[in-house]
Image (spheres, coloured by chain):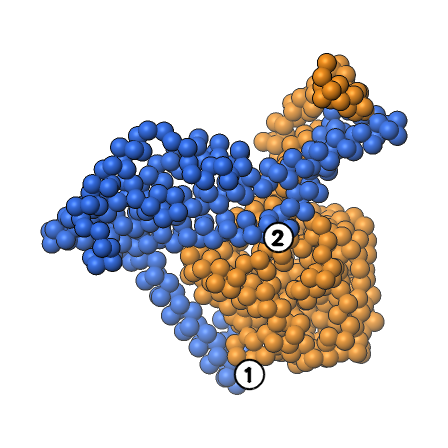
């Protein structure tokens, strides 16, 4: 035996793999046994797979945008209404994924009246919509409708991720119409991660900064709208190996558990339902925010008007997810002093970017904290 | 055509010589620089070899069959135009540019896959080291599924590190640029066909949608300028 093969033999012996053929076959048989339950995939009804099921009424529509008002469930209501603004990159149903994992239901249970915006699915015709069209157009109209419905002059605005940026811009440009601003997992400082890089975190930030402004222009010019599936794919590529096991052994593992399987399928239904993003929004989002970081520098201009964070003088609640790898904490945390308000609160919740709204631990904290924060400022 | 001092005759002779030479398999001049995986992929790809022979790619094949096409175009192109086949000439040119873009995209994708494979390899080496450390501690892996999960954890780290690193971001950007360029060339070809058939082009549609959007913006501005009572009536029209 040569020296090399002796070394190889020693290394092989040193490995602690004690998987006997019998045990491996036993495990494989177990998995194959679970495969028999795969027929359940075709047996679930549309009602069982439905997401966003909290009863709600459409109160306004404009183009593809809809504004809904959830039907109150609490016996004792606080007389506080919240308008939730979700991101464009996913659908609003994330805040109402399942009956027992619904952020909306939890807010309703706290006695809060809930309105939410469904941005819909932009078509080819909406290719030229800008961030300003969303903020000063659709969102402003939705705010007016909520005010009219509730008989109020100002709304409690809550933005999620990209919706948080829209809400921040709105609160700056229309500060007279916002009573309180709540931000969740919102990347206010797009360059916050530059000095705090973390493996597996903030890939979108790095990727966007690695492109030139000309690259972004050419991307938008050739694509028009940014296809939803492409956005979905880029999210998948943030954790490629984890997704590989998620759709193979992890899925096999839960095939015989209806509750877990339904949870998985509902989440997948949400994940795969990615709307296209209007080209001009994408252009501005990448160039002005990911690359230029103009919001935090008070340099962002929408419709010819400067978005100045110092004009945000209403109370601000900024919620970040401790394990967020989509929006690194360094991009969403530590915003004290950036706004024009003295009443700034920061709250960290356990879980990741999406886990904030569907995770068990975060769910116990999120809605009650928001209700408490709002109640404390109700008559202020 | 004054941009090339070579006479049409010599273009034809050189092109024919290149075509005959290309029939004899020869090692690519830059094959040594590529990684084994990349070279194998490129050699095995019928598209790559086909395109490299047909399209004007200065770096790989300065003359070759592309010169032959160029010669035909120079000799007979004007005649085709006179017969009303100008769109066909334009389409032919667009098609050749698209082939170049496809080849460039394919090369960028190979480079990307090569990098992913390297990260994958690093991760697997890390798994072996982890297993050896476990053995030293007297721990054992007795489950196949546990082993697969260990592997996944080991590979994920290096993959993140590689793709978030300078080279990973560069290669990703290269794929994006090449894909965009290919899309641009495809749109150009489709635009020529649309023009020829008097069908609205992508640019026509974009212009129309842009005008509609600008009108909507103007309408919004005018509505907001109205007194609140009238504005309220306008908002109510948005009721379902």
Above or below, comparing residue B124 to residue A236 in the picture: above
Q: Are marks 2 and 1 on the same chain?
A: yes
Residue A366 screen position, x and y as percent: 78, 58
At mark 2, the secondary structure is: helix
Above or below, comparing residue B53 to residue A354 in the picture: above
Q: Which color is chain A depicted in?
A: orange
Residue A272 screen position, x and y as percent: 57, 45
Above or below, comparing residue B23 to residue A224 in the picture: above
Residue A30 screen position, x and y as percent: 72, 21
**Mark 2, mark 1: which one is toward the viewer?**
2
Q: Do labels 2 and 1 touch, CB within 8 Å? A: no
Please tell me which residue is depicted at 65% across the width and 43% down the height of the picture: B159
Above or below, comparing residue A60 to residue A258 in the picture: below
Q: Residue furthest right?
A: B137
Decide which of tag 2 and tag 1 comes sooner along the chain. 2
| Residue position for label 2 | B166
Q: Is residue A236 left or right of residue B110?
A: right
Does the image show residue A344? Answer: yes
Q: Viewer-proximal residue, B172 or B40?
A: B40
Q: Which chain does the residue under circle 1 lie in?
A: B
Does the image show residue B99? Answer: no
Q: Viewer-proximal residue, A147 or B76?
A: B76
Q: Quadrant of residue A161?
A: bottom right
Please tell me which residue is depicted at 81% across the width and 50% down the height of the picture: A361
Residue A183 screen position, x and y as percent: 71, 65
Q: Which color is chain B depicted in?
A: blue
Classed neighbour count for the residue bearing mark 2: other residues with Cα under 10 Å, few (<14), some (14–19), many (≥20): few
Quadrant of the rendering where the N terminus of chain B is positioned: bottom left
At mark 1, the secondary structure is: helix
Say which mark, if any, is on residue B228: 1
Classed neighbour count for the residue bearing mark 1: other residues with Cα under 10 Å, few (<14), some (14–19), many (≥20): few
């Amino acid at each position: 035996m040569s020296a090399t093969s002796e070394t190889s033999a020693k290394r092989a012996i040193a490995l602690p793999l004690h998987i006997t053929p019998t045990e491996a076959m036993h495990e494989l048989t177990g998995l194959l046994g679970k495969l028999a339950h795969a027929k359940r995939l075709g047996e679930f009804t549309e009602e069982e797979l439905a997401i966003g099921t909290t009863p709600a009424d459409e109160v306004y529509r404009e183009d593809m945008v809809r504004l809904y008002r959830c039907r109150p469930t609490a016996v004792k209501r606080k007389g506080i209404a919240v308008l939730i603004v979700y991101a464009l990159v996913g659908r609003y149903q994330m805040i109402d994924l399942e009956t027992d994992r619904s952020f909306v239901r939890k807010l309703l249970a706290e006695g809060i009246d809930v309105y939410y915006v469904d941005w819909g699915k932009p078509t080819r015709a909406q290719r030229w919509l800008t961030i300003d069209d969303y903020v000063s157009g659709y969102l402003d109209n939705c705010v007016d409708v909520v005010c009219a419905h509730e008989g109020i002059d100002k709304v409690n605005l809550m933005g999620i991720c990209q919706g948080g940026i829209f809400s921040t811009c709105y609160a700056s440009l229309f500060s007279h119409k916002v009573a309180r601003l709540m931000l969740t997992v919102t990347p206010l400082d797009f360059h916050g991660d530059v000095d705090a890089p973390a493996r597996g975190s903030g890939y979108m930030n790095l990727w966007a900064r690695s492109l030139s402004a000309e690259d972004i222009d050419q991307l938008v010019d050739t694509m028009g709208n940014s296809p939803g599936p492409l956005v979905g794919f880029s999210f998948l590529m943030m954790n490629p190996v984890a997704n590989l096991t998620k759709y193979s052994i992890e899925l096999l593992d839960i095939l015989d558990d209806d509750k877990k399987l339904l949870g998985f399928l509902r989440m997948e239904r949400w994940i795969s339902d990615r709307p296209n993003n209007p080209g001009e929004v994408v252009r501005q989002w990448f160039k002005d925010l990911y690359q230029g970081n103009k919001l935090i520098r008070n340099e962002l201009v929408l419709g010819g008007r400067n978005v100045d964070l110092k004009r945000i003088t209403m109370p601000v609640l900024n919620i970040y997810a401790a394990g967020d790898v989509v929006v690194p904490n360094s991009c969403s945390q530590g915003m004290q002093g950036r706004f024009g308000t003295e009443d700034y609160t920061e709250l960290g919740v356990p879980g990741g970017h999406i886990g904030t709204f569907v995770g068990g631990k975060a769910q116990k904290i999120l809605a009650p904290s928001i209700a408490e924060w709002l109640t404390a400022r109700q008559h202020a | 055509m004054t941009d090339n001092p070579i006479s049409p005759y010599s273009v034809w002779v050189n092109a024919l010589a290149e075509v005959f030479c290309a029939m004899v398999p020869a090692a690519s001049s830059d094959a040594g620089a590529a990684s084994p995986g990349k070279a194998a992929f490129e050699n095995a790809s019928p598209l790559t070899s086909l395109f490299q022979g047909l399209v004007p790619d200065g770096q790989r094949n300065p003359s070759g069959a592309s010169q032959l096409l160029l010669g035909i175009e120079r000799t007979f192109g004007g005649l085709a135009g006179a017969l009303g086949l100008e769109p066909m000439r334009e389409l032919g040119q667009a098609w050749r540019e698209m082939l170049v873009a496809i080849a460039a995209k394919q090369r960028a994708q190979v480079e990307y896959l090569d990098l992913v494979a390297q990260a994958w390899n690093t991760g697997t080496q890390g798994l072996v080291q982890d297993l050896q450390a476990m053995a030293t501690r007297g721990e054992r892996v007795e489950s196949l599924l546990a082993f697969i999960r260990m592997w996944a954890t080991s590979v994920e780290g290096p993959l993140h590190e590689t793709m978030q690193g300078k080279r990973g971001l560069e290669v990703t950007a290269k794929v994006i640029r090449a894909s965009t360029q290919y899309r641009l060339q495809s749109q150009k070809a489709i635009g020529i066909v649309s023009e020829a058939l008097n069908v609205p082009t992508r640019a026509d549609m974009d212009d129309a949608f842009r005008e509609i959007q600008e009108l909507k913006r103007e309408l919004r501005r005018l509505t907001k300028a109205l007194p609140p009572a009238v504005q309220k009536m306008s908002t109510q029209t948005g009721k379902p």
